[in-house]
Amino acid sequence: MRLNIYGMTPKKLGEYFGAGGDNPAKAAIVLDGIYRKRIGSFSELPLSQRVTEQLSRDFSFQLPEVVQVLDSSDTAKLLLRLSDGEYVEAVLMRQSFGSCVCVSTQVGCSMGCSFCQSGRLRRRRDLSPDEIVGQVLAIENTFGVKVTGISVMGIGEPFDNFTNVTEFLDIVTYPKGLALGEKHVTVSTCGLVPEIRKYAELPHPCNLAVSLHAPNDELRSGLMPINRRYPLSEVLSAAEYFSVKANRRITLEYIMLGGVNDLPCHAQQLSDLIGDRSFYVNIIPYNPTDADMFRKSSRDDIMRFYDVLKKNGIGVTMRREFGSELKAACGQLSADYTK
Ligand code: SAH
């Protein structure tokens, strides 16, 4: 069976050439051809006929099939069909500073966060590296944009698919390929502690965001089942390990759930929890899902929460809302498996 060329990391492609007695540096020529010149056939590469014929025998150029395009002014969403008939979604956010894509990493998700639409699905399978890269290319091809930022925040828990996600990161950050800077790619996790530590050990990790959503274990365990396995103290010390090791500031994501976690006392607890660690808080408005257990916090409650963090010297930003009219906002992706 042929492998998908979009799933080949620079290292694996170099090894492929090396194993066949060729110069591993040919990998750079192939990746430059695919991601920069956007060749559709290996015969377009400046390589000998023997090599291009061998590549054609060994690799395909398969992308996920675009089955639905939803587009509004600043956000667009693609429904993509994978080779085995499963579906995932990818979102484009048109921002003043560039085009950012939000990619999915699994078909379904088994983390079961109570406020998340994707969490209502069971995990059906992991996406392969080529299926994650394919989402970026499908967005670029469909909308004629050059992607300048990637959020690994679509359907799925990226660290529950660690190897494939890190291979995806190697592919999109490769300087002769899509060439995204490590600081322009952010992986968001619900808090899988061993993988946060493993991620910190990578030679060139991208950014990290941690979905916190609550300032104490009781509240967090009620919202996010994963907290029973990895409580807040462990999540935050792993995040701190990453921030020191990679010398990066970490984003703590915090959804504002009206009356649940948005009171001034929660903001104070959160400030105490962070202390003088190099974390900043990204306040996210709650986007409604089919489970209407929660409501959005009022503007006033959000401002009060924000002010307490500010007063305590915590860096805090508010996430702009994208895509709720397309069911493309954070926590709303489901690819409608449920229908
Ligand atoms: N599994 C990863 C990445 C996917 S979710 C994670 O948990 O981080 C991306 C972000 O959207 C997470 O911070 C998630 O908690 C948040 N989110 C989930 N449901 C949401 C909702 N209904 N409204 C707003 N944000 C939501």
Image: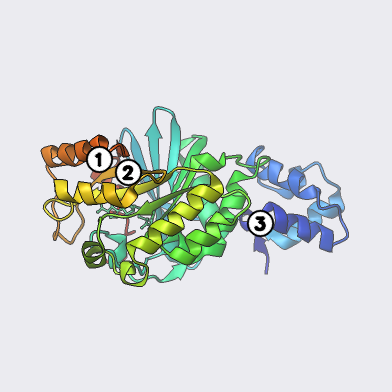
Question: Which comes sooner in the sequence, label 3 or label 2?
Answer: 3
N-terminal-most mark, 1 or 2: 2
| Residue 309, disc | 1
Looking at the picture, tell me which residue is in the foreground, 264 or 73: 264
In primary-sequence order, the first of circles 1 and 3 is: 3
Give the color scheme: rainbow, by chain, secondary structure or one colour: rainbow
Residue 87 percent location from the top left of the image: 41, 61
Say which residue label 2 marks.
281
Figure quadrant of residue 125: bottom left
Above or below residue 97? Residue 262 is: below
Decide if residue 250 is in sight here: yes
Identify which residue is drawn at 26% across, 64% down: 217
Marks 1 and 2: which is nearer the front?
1
- Secondary structure of the residue carrying tag 1 is helix
Most foreground residue, 190 or 247:
247
Residue 286 in view in this figure: no
Q: Residues within 10 Å of mark 1 (few under 14, many from 20)?
A: many
Q: Taking 11 as reference, is 36 above or below it?
A: above
Within 10 Å of disc 2 (Cα), the crowding (few <14, some 14-19, many 20+) is many
Rendered position, 124 above or below 241: below
Query: Which amino acid type corresponds to the residue marked 2 in the rendered image?
Result: Val
Q: Check contact, mark 1 vs mark 2: CB within 8 A.
A: yes
- Give the spatial CA distance, label 3 vs label 2: 35 Å
**Which image quarter is the N terminus in?**
bottom right
Q: In which quarter of the image is ligand 1?
A: bottom left
Tag 1: amino acid: Leu
For disc 3, the marked residue is 8
* SS for dot 2: strand
